[in-house]
């Protein structure tokens, strides 16, 4: 069923500085996520995010997620440092049954104009789902974040609770 369709809004990304590591240093590292959290609204800049205080969502509410990737494998092409990530989404109910499995739910191409091939820093991703239309209950949300150029990935998981939306009066 289409109870939990996900449409990701355009990603917010920013690179404020380029560090002075050796150009090929990140080529042999696996992707890292230094920070991931559920947020109150979408972040619009690196580290400018308000963490959500709980994991309870009203049915029909959207979910905002923020993360900071590091150690992405990059390429230098046409005056730009490029990297790419893909995020898969899986949602399991309280019994562990997979009820949503969206491979490639979100694509993040990164291109930063630069004079040479230097490592990227201060990257972030902010994504929002469409309204959650699942029955009230407990769920596990798993994101599998892929470094598309490097071939590595990692999983991050969070438990959420869906409650019925308040009736309008």
Image (cartoon, helix red, strand yellow):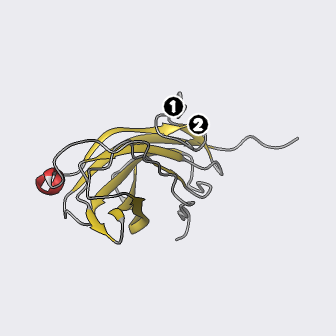
| Label 2: how many Cα within 10 Å (few below 14, some 14–19, many 20+) | some
Between 162 and 109, the one lying in front of the other is: 109
Q: What residue appears at the point 56 percent right and 46 percent down from the top-left corner?
A: 136
- Please name the residue that numbered disc 2 is placed on: 40
| Label 1: how many Cα within 10 Å (few below 14, some 14–19, many 20+) | some
Q: Earlier in the sequence, mark 2 or mark 1?
A: 2
For the residues bearing labels 2 and 1, Cβ distance under 8 angstroms: yes
Q: CA distance from mark 2 to mark 1?
A: 6 Å
Residue 84 seen from this side: no
Q: What residue appears at the point 24 percent right and 66 percent down from the top-left corner?
A: 149
Lateral position of residue 91 relative to residue 161, left or right: left
Q: Secondary structure at mark 2?
A: loop
The numbered disc on residue 129 is none
Residue 65, x across and y down, in percent: 48, 45
Vertical placement of residue 39 versus 101, above or below: above
Residue 6 seen from this side: yes
- Please name the residue that numbered disc 1 is placed on: 51
Question: The C terminus lies in which quarter of the figure?
Answer: top right
Residue 88, x across and y down, in percent: 36, 62
Vertical placement of residue 162 versus 85, above or below: above
């Amino acid at each position: 069923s289409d109870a939990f369709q996900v449409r990701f809004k355009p990603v917010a990304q920013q690179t404020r500085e380029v560090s002075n590591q050796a150009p090929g240093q990140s080529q042999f590292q696996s992707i890292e996520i230094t920070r991931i959290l559920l947020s109150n609204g979408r972040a619009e800049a690196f580290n400018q995010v308000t963490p959500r205080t709980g994991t309870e969502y009203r049915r029909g509410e959207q979910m905002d997620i923020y993360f900071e990737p590091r150690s992405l494998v990059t390429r230098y092409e046409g005056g730009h440092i490029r990297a790419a990530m893909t995020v898969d989404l899986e949602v399991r109910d309280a019994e562990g049954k997979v009820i949503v499995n969206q491979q490639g739910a979100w694509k993040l191409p990164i291109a930063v104009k630069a004079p040479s091939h230097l490592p990227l820093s201060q990257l972030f991703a902010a994504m929002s789902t469409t309204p959650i239309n699942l029955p009230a209950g407990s769920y596990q949300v798993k994101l599998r974040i892929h470094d598309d150029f490097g071939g590595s990935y990692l999983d991050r998981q969070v438990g959420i609770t869906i409650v019925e939306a308040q009736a309008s009066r």
